[in-house]
Image (cartoon, rainbow, N blue to C red):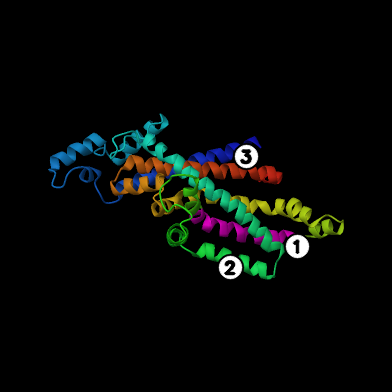
Amino acid sequence: MRTYILRRVAQSALTLLGVSVLVFVILRVLPGDPARMLLPDGAPESAVAELNRQLGLHEPLIVQYGLFLRSVAHGDFGQSFQYRAPALRVVLERLPATVQLTLAAMLVTIAVGVSLGIFTAVRRGTRYDVAGTIVAVLGQSLPNFWLGIMLILLFGVALRWLPTSGFASWTSLVLPAITLAAFPTALVARLTRSSMLEILNRDYIRTGRAKGLTEQSVVLRHALRNAAIPVLTVIGLQIGALLGGAVITESVFAWPGMGKLIVDAIFFRDFPVVQTVLILSATVFVAINLLVDLLYTVIDPRIRYL
């Protein structure tokens, strides 16, 4: 068990190192000079060169990356070019709103997706199964930005039931959370259905029914437990995907999270803020996947020996 955990932790650390290299290099090879974005139009070349020197962008790329790694090791992600403040502090100020939205979307995904998958699996071939499958396909097909705008027009403008933008109370969370959760909910529902159908055809399930177990016990206690591994994998991956997808949803609903922050940071070539957002997002993504892998060993102990 200890060897398995150490191997997965080492793989996670290498993954984060690879992400940091990619993010750092891609940002610097893309067109656009941060100094020219920060200075007024028509600024002389000498001023541009001086500002690049102050920002540390005059050094060779490998030197910049080495300095960046050393700073990150001490918890310093650099100074935001745009806000003139520590990039980590700028990002952390926006992080709670994004985490709040992501958690709300994840709750919707797990509650609705798993329930819909079980419901359609145990009613395979009925009109309920057809209706649930149509809803799942629609959820995967509709673009986030279009669904968000339609929800705003229906529940915000026409019915006036819910706020359409910003964050004033918990009701402001409803429409963005539904929009963000639409795709992963549909994905989890379809995967849960297919996994449950495979398990429900196994001999031990038929044996359980023959022994007189209740249908609820067969489905929730025996079938769902064994169908959970692929579903758990997808749910773990979707948490990271939700953080990335929140950029579009936050822009549609003017949600005060990291989405608008990173869009503005990319526009102003604010490298420290972009790097901080992407590396923190990757860290969360890798940590969740590590946790999911460790949970596998609890659900199926044979995995730790693979």
Q: Main secondary structure of the magenta part?
A: helix
Which residue lies most toward the top here? 74
- The answer to whether any part of residue 234 appears in the image is no
- The answer to whether any part of residue 24 appears in the image is yes
Earlier along the polypeptide chain: callout 3 or callout 1?
3
**Front position among marks 2 and 1:** 2
Quarter-of-image position of residue 47: top left
**Front position among marks 3 and 2:** 2
The percent position of residue 41, horizontal first and vertical second, equals: 15, 47
Position of the N terminus by quadrant: top right
Please tell me which residue lies in front, 74 or 96. 96
Q: Residues within 10 Å of mark 1 (few under 14, many from 20)?
A: few
Is residue 185 in the magenta section? yes
The percent position of residue 165, horizontal first and vertical second, equals: 41, 51
Q: To which residue does mark 1 refer? A: 201
Q: Residues within 10 Å of mark 3 (few under 14, many from 20)?
A: some
**Front position among marks 3 and 1:** 1
Question: Residue at the location (66% across, 67% down)?
Answer: 129
Q: To which residue does mark 2 refer? A: 134
Question: Residue at the location (58% across, 39% down)?
Answer: 7
- Per the rendered image, the range of residues in magenta is 178-200
Q: To which residue does mark 3 refer? A: 4
Give the SS element for disc 2: helix
